Image: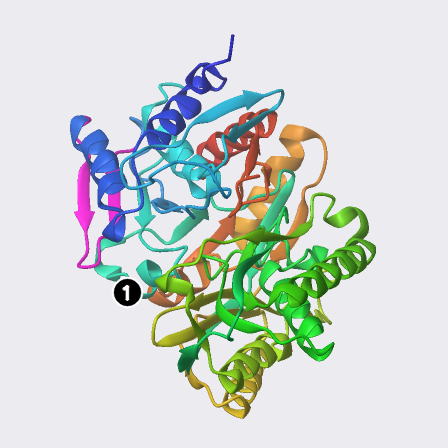
Amino acid sequence: MSTPVASLEPRVVWSHFDAILKVPRPSKHEEKIAAHVEDWARGRGFEVRRDAVGNMVVVVPATPGHEEAPTVVLQGHLDMVCEKNFGVERDFMTQGIEAYVDGDWVRARGTTLGADNGIGLAAAMAVADDPEAVHGPLEILATVDEETGLTGAKQLDPSILHGRLMVNLDTEEDGAVYFGCAGGADVHLELAANRRKGLLGSTPVRLVVRGLKGGHSGLNIIENRGNAVKLATRVLLKAIDGGLELDLVSLNGGDKHNAIPREAFAVCRVDKDGKGQLEDVVAACLADFREEFGGIEPDLDVALEEVAEDDANAMALNQHVRDRLLHLVNALPHGVLSMSREVPGLVETSNNVAVVKTEAERLLVHTSHRSSVMPALYAVGEQLRSIGQAAGAKVTIHDAYPGWKPNPSSPLVQKTVAVAERMFGKRPELKAIHAGLECGLLLEKAPGMDAVSIGPELRNPHSPDEAVQISTVDRFYRLLKELLRELA
């Protein structure tokens, strides 16, 4: 018999998380999950403030006797990355997440779990409900559209936020206190999809790259995981360079700008003899990839599948368009570009080749780059622009968002470290993260804000392998309660 998620301890956290999992997503500005949180707040008589883009502040009164304490902002985001494995039938618009307990972990069946940042949101709501929690005035700040580029934080109306001490609940590592993060930006490249009728006597086949771990394009980029889009491109180029007459109908892979692509699919047209040659190339590339990635990607698979003839695959890209697309994707850098000179072990700058999408009249390539050094961030964007323009692509660099500059002398950071060390008998690691926490943007919006970030142990966010460790949720929640008690 399976263990219900809502029955886990601390139950006040897990019951909120279970309720969050049941809310269908995504929707524009997370209206459904926002309505869930607002209904909860108003049902308890809490004031709710909303701004024009949908960001929400729930005002939680202080524990009696602590009304004069400084207001603390508990901050998380309402949205999640909705990813699922190939073949999994789940409509995020109408269905919630199917979660289950696996030993000391909570996972989802074939989809992302949404613990990023559902577990943080649940902890903030739990503090407001917990009769044992002691705290001063609280403001639960729940932002929208974090996963699509931190646009909620970018457009936050600061008038809805009064507190100047902020505990971000979006860190994904137990035993660590975060005090800095990277900034980031997206680049979109577009080619015209000029087409002609496929090669005479050719038949369609589908190249499939699958079984990769994917994961968070910031947190997991240091692990050098495989990128399915890049690998599929390498297979196709190897076949073409070997003299195979190959028409490319479509190349699709990746889904989210902040997730490393796990799967990629290329529909091609080859003649009878060419199919056998392509099968040989696929086998050779699979052997090379397994040697290259070793134990990092144990489930990596590259295969060729039959495809039925239809109107959708009758028209192939012109050869020069095919070559532009493949060489563009192959040339784009993916992975760690530099390590921090200031913080040992911290990725300073990286790029994720995130999405390739074939449409009827255009070919789209989306990348996402990050850096804790803003000049380096801008330099990567210009490098990507140069590569795109050399391939004849239309290049759009979207507005960058700032990083959160580490400040180890922050009173709130020092208080959090001291409380954690006293509670658990071990000094927590003080870290900066190569990911886009909203703190940098929010500190710009609210001058004088002091911030810190904590959370439980999450693995493989932004992928269907996402999991949150049950025992660390208990430690995270106890630390949050004790920190609020100290600040009160």
Q: Is residue 17 left or right of residue 8?
A: left
Residue at x 47% of width, y 62% of height: 257
User: In this figure, which colouring scheme has been used for the structure?
Assistant: rainbow
Q: Is residue 129 left or right of residue 435?
A: left
Q: Using the rendered image of the protein, determine whether residue 335 is visible from the camera's viewpoint.
A: no
Q: Position of residue 31 (x, y in %)?
A: 22, 45
Q: Secondary structure at mark 1?
A: loop
In the image, is residue 15 above or below residue 330? above
Q: Considering depth in this image, is 423 or 244 the residue closer to the camera? A: 244
Q: Which residues are magenta?
A: 44-62
Q: Is residue 422 left or right of residue 76?
A: right
Q: Considering depth in this image, is 465 or 266 the residue closer to the camera? A: 266
* Residue type marked 1: Gln
Q: Position of residue 484 (x, y in %)?
A: 44, 35
In the image, is residue 378 above or below residue 118? below
Of all residues, the one furthest to the top in this rendering is 1
Q: Position of residue 332 (x, y in %)?
A: 60, 77
Q: Position of residue 371 (x, y in %)?
A: 58, 71
Residue at x 58% of width, y 51% of height: 305
Q: Considering depth in this image, is 477 or 388 the residue closer to the camera? A: 388
Of all residues, the one furthest to the front in this rendering is 201
Q: Is residue 141 magenta?
A: no
Residue at numbered disc 1: 155
Q: Is residue 220 left or right of residue 63?
A: right
In the image, is residue 112 above or below residue 216? above
Q: Considering depth in this image, is 377 or 255 the residue closer to the camera? A: 255
Residue at x 48% of width, y 56% of height: 437
Q: Using the rendered image of the protein, determine whether residue 77 is visible from the camera's viewpoint.
A: yes
Q: Is residue 61 magenta?
A: yes
**Quarter of the image where the C terminus is located:** top left
In the image, is residue 14 above or below residue 417? above
